[in-house]
Image (tube, rainbow, N blue to C red):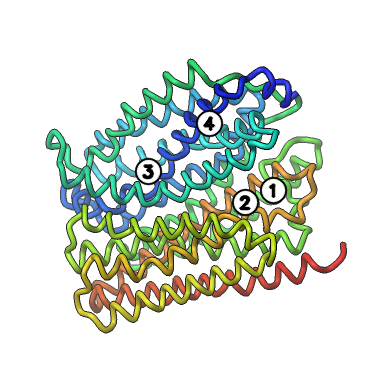
Amino acid sequence: MDQTLAVTTDSSRRWRVLAIVVSAQFMFGVDSFIVNVAIPTISAELNASSSQLEAVIAIYLIGYATLIVTGGRLGDIYGTRTVFLAGVIGFTVTSLWCGLARSGTELILARLAQGTTAALMVPQVLATLHVLFPDAARAKAFAIYGIVLGLAGAAGFALGGLLVTLDLGGYGWRAIFFVNVPVGLIILAAAAWVVPQAPRRTGTRLDLPGAAILFTGLLCVIGPLLFGREIGWAWWVWAVMAGGVGIVLIFLRYERAVAARGGMPLVDLGLLADPAFVRGLGAVFCFFFANQSFYLVVTLYMQMVLEIPPLQAGLVFLPLALAFVIASRHSGARAKRRGTLVLIEGCLLQISGLALVALTVATIAAPTPFLLALVLIVTGYGQGLVMAPLSGAVLSTVQAASAGSGSGLYGTTTQISSAAGIAAIGSIYFSLAEAFTGQFAFLMALTLIAGSVAGSVVLLHWMRRAALVPS
C-alpha cells in the first residue's frame, strides 16, 4: 500500500515533498526556541510575570505533547495530506494570534493553541517520509530531516534576536510570530500543489477522552511549578499537584479499560512491561528535562544578568548548533560500533561542557558573547551525540507491531519532560535570582541540569543491562 504511493510519486517530486514537509517541521522547531531571546521585551511590553514567561514556553510543549499521538491517528483516518494542511492552517492562524496578544495570559492561551495545531502538522512529516522513501534514498532523506532538526534551535535563537533587534514595522517581539504567517502560507500553497495523499489506514480510532485526561493531569502537575513561587507555595498549590498525579493515575486506569474493551488507547501500556523500554523512557525524560531548561537559563543569564543584546545572545548559540549537527552526523557510525555506549559518552561529554560553562561564569564576572559561544561548543557536541541515536536505542526492544505506539510514547515523553524542565528549573532560577544573584542562580541551575543528565547516564546503563538479558 505504501509502496504504491512511492512508485506513483516520481523521484523529483518526492524530493520537493520532502522540502515542503521538512520546512513545516523546521517552523515548529524554530518556534520552540524563538521566544527565549524575546523574553525581556515580552516581559516589559505585556508586563508579564516570570511565571507567565515560563508558561509561554512550556504550554506550547504541553499542548503538542498531549495531542501528538492523536494527530498521528487523525492522519491515518483522514489522510496525511489533509491533516497536514489543516495543521499548517491552524499553526499559521495561531501564530498570528500570538503576535496580536495583548496580555501575558492571552499569549499563553495563544501558545497553547499553537502547540495543539502543531500536533496535527508535525506527525504527518515523518509519516510522509516513511511512505515516500522506502528505498535506498531513505537514509539521505532522514539525514536531511535530522540536520533540519539540529539547525532549528539555533535558527530560532538567531532569528528571534534579529527580528527583535530590527523591530520591523515597530512590531518588536511580535514579529517573531508574525513571520510564521507568510512562511505558513507559502508552505500551505506548495503542499496543496505537490504533496500527495497517503492511503488511509482502516480500523484506526481516536482516544480524545484519554488525551483530555492526560492534558488535565499534566497541567495540574506542571502549572503549580510555573506559578507556585508567585503565590508563596500555598498549601493548595501542593494539593493541585497531588491531584494532578492522581489524574495521571486515572489516565493509566482509563487506558487499560480502553484496551480491555478492544479500543485503541492513546498509550499502549503493554510497552511498560518491557524493562529496557521503561528505563530508556526514564533516560529520555532526564535528558530532555535538562535540554530545554538549559537553553532557557543560558538565555536568561545572558540577557538579564550580562545584558547582552538579543541579536548577540541569539548568535552565541550558532557554534553550539554547528557542533550539534557535526556530532549528529558522527553519532550514527559510532552507534553502530558501540551501541548505547555512545549515548553514555555523549551525556558525560555534555556534563563536562556544563562544568566548563559553570567554571567560566564562576571565574569571570562578565564573560563576553564570544567566550560563551566557545565554551558552549562542548555541550552542543555532547547533545548531538545523544539526540540522533537516542530514539533508535530506546525503541530497539519494542516489537514491530508496537512501533507506532512506542514512537508516540517516546515523542510525548520528550515534550512533557521539556515542559517540566522549563517549569522546575525556571522556577528555581527565578527564586534564587531574587534571593541572591543572577550569577548564583545560573550556577545552581547548571548544577541541577548536570544532575539530570547524570540521571540519564544511570538509566541508560540500566537500559543497556536490561536489553542484554534474553526475554
Which label was assigned to residue 18? 4
At label 1, counting other C-alpha atoms closer than 10 Å, the crowd grade (few under 14, some 14-19, many 20 or more) is many
Whole-number angstrom distance, CA of label 4 to CA of label 2 = 23 Å
- Marked residue nearer the N-terminal end (3 or 4): 4
Which label was assigned to residue 31? 3
Whole-number angstrom distance, CA of label 4 to CA of label 1 = 24 Å
Residue 440, image quadrant: bottom left
Return the residue found at the far right.
471
- Judging from the image, what secondary structure is the residue with disc 1 in? helix
**Which quadrant: the C terminus?**
bottom right
- Judging from the image, what secondary structure is the residue with disc 2 in? helix
Task: Tally the numbered discs.
Answer: 4
Q: Are marks 1 and 2 in contact (CB under 8 Å)?
A: yes
Q: Are marks 4 and 2 in contact (CB under 8 Å)?
A: no
Whole-number angstrom distance, CA of label 1 to CA of label 3 = 25 Å
Amino acid type of the residue that numbered disc 2 sits on in the rendered structure: Tyr
Q: Dot 1 corresponds to which residue?
A: 406
Compared to 439, does 46 lie above or below? above
Is 192 on the left-hand or right-hand side of 277?
left
Residue name at image x 57 percent, y 54 percent: 388
Is residue 168 in sight in this rendering? yes
